Amino acid sequence: MRKIAVLLGTIGCICLFAILFWSNTSIDGTSVTAPQKANAGNIPELSHEQIVSTLGEFMEILVQETDEHGIVLRIDNLEDLYQAFDALAAREVVQPYVEYYYTETEEGLYLLPTETPPWFIPENEYDIQTSGNKVTITQQNTTDLYGTYTIEIEFTFDGSQWKITKITH
């Protein structure tokens, strides 16, 4: 009888551990994988607040205030614009956006008057995949302008902070 009790206790502990370890929903409702929860190394977890803040700041830098002629008011040239992004994202991530939306002339830096790209929507659910020092978030959205689209954003921890290292949509 004692052996059966020990066996049942062991099986119960294993089941409880498996349920806790492999649960795939975080407190904020986003879907996560077990490796993200188990990431106890010296790489800090990328929180929902950090994701929202970083992606919001990215868009704020991308969409600069302009005068009535489209000349950017607070940034004078492309290099200064790239430097504004440096704390948030790798240059190779920023470059396609800057090349599409901005033109530098003798008069100043011009912003193309157009819509913003399909982007992360903070209120919508997203999936998180973690692998080493990389976190990839994937979100499917539907908007009037773009219809249904999927955006995938990779963050990499560079030893001191999380940076955007890849964006696909």
Image (tube, rainbow, N blue to C red):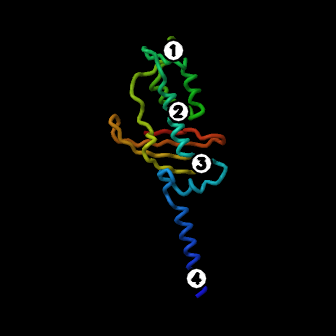
How many numbered marks does the figure carry? 4
Q: Residue at image x 47%, y 26%?
A: 63
Disc 1: which residue: 108
In terms of sequence position, does the residue under pointer 1 or pointer 3 come before the other? 3
Q: Residue at image x 56%, y 56%?
A: 35
Q: Which mark is residue 12?
A: none
Q: Residue at image x 35%, y 36%?
A: 146
In terms of sequence position, does the residue under pointer 2 or pointer 3 come before the other? 3
Disc 2: which residue: 57
Kindly report the distance in space between the C-alpha atoms of the residues bearing marks 1 and 3: 40 Å
In terms of sequence position, does the residue under pointer 1 or pointer 2 come before the other? 2
Residue 120 to residue 42: above or below? above
Q: Which mark is residue 5?
A: 4
Left/right placement of residue 32 relative to residue 45 reads: left
Disc 3: which residue: 45
In terms of sequence position, does the residue under pointer 3 or pointer 4 come before the other? 4
Q: Secondary structure at mark 3?
A: loop
Kindly report the distance in space between the C-alpha atoms of the residues bearing marks 2 and 3: 19 Å
Q: Residues within 10 Å of mark 4 (few under 14, many from 20)?
A: few
